[in-house]
Amino acid sequence: MVRAAMKAPYLDREEEHDLAVRWKEKKDQQALHRVVTAHMRLVISMASKFRKFGLPINDLIQEGHVGLLEAAARFEPDRGVRFSTYATWWIRASIQDYILRNWSIVRGGTSSAQKALFFGLRRLRSRLARQFPGAPDSMIFDEIATVVGVPAADVALMDARLAAPDQSLNAPVGESDGTSSERMDLLASGSPLQDQTVGAAIDGARRNLWLNDALNVLTPRERVIIRLRRLDENGATLEVLGKRLGVSKERVRQIENRALEKLKIALLKANPDPAVFTA
């Protein structure tokens, strides 16, 4: 593609206008092909300016080609503007969008200010470093924030992202006893410790036993209300229980309160320390 683009003939203004009119009015595919081929040099030149972001140059050229086709679809030949001038914006925008989508797995800001910060940070920082030698980063970030129109905190965050690209958690970090380790192995686990898990299981089983014993002090209707209102994962409403038991909602509430009080007395009688129920 690159060699063919370099060998493609240039178009003078009159020929370019004629081809653009043929494509615009008659959808002449041959005319479109000649316009696009003649401007692939522009795409390659633009793509090469973004190589520092570490993405394959062929992918950047392909994305620039997409932008070139978009420019050809929107170009108005009778406005008197050269196609290369018009297409430059579309080519750059297409390449920049591709970089923003693929440079990092963490999606960055897509506003115009954030895009300007992403693509202009290194250039601005280098220029300000020459202008203010020895200046602290905070001052440089404040100056860049003023130029781009974003908070200084965004500048610092973007600087950190550009300085430290994504790293895989499966990347090896060394070997120990003949076994290779990965970054994933160094992450702290948020799970409870084994003794905490075992202790919680034992305490839970003990509390369930106490509760089942305490439920025996309730009448059958009280047990139904407590189980359906308090112990079921999807607690029943007072209205539903009232219809089921043939009483009013207020009566269900009164029975529930009385049953809860009886449970409290029974539980505290078996275990006088209330802390065992909340530990």
Image: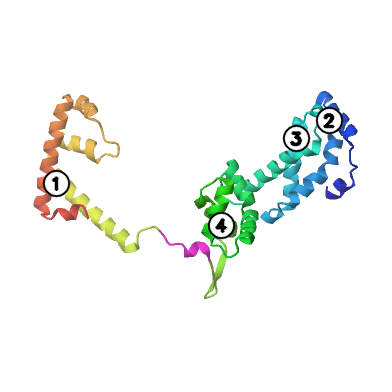
Q: Which residue is mark 3?
A: 71
Q: Residue at x 60, y 64 (%)?
A: 133
Q: Which residue is mark 1?
A: 214
> How far is disc 3 from disc 4 in space, using C-alphas?
37 Å
Q: Position of residue 132 (x, y in %)?
A: 60, 61
Is label 3 or label 4 in front?
4
How many numbered markers are drawn? 4
Q: Is residue 45 left or right of residue 240?
A: right
- Is residue 66 visible to us here? no
Q: Is residue 6 left or right of residue 89?
A: right
Q: Residue furthest bottom?
A: 177
- Is residue 263 visible to us here? yes
Give the residue type at disc 2: Ala
Give the residue type at disc 1: Ala
Q: Residue at x 74, y 35 (%)?
A: 70
Is label 1 or label 4 in front?
4
Q: Position of residue 252 (x, y in %)?
A: 16, 30
The span picked out in magenta is 182-189
1 or 3: tag closer to the N-terminus: 3
2 or 3: tag closer to the N-terminus: 2
Would residue 126 be counted in the magenta stretch? no
The label shown at residue 140 is: 4
Q: Which residue is mark 2?
A: 20
Q: Are the residues tagged 2 and 3 within 8 Å (C-beta)? A: no
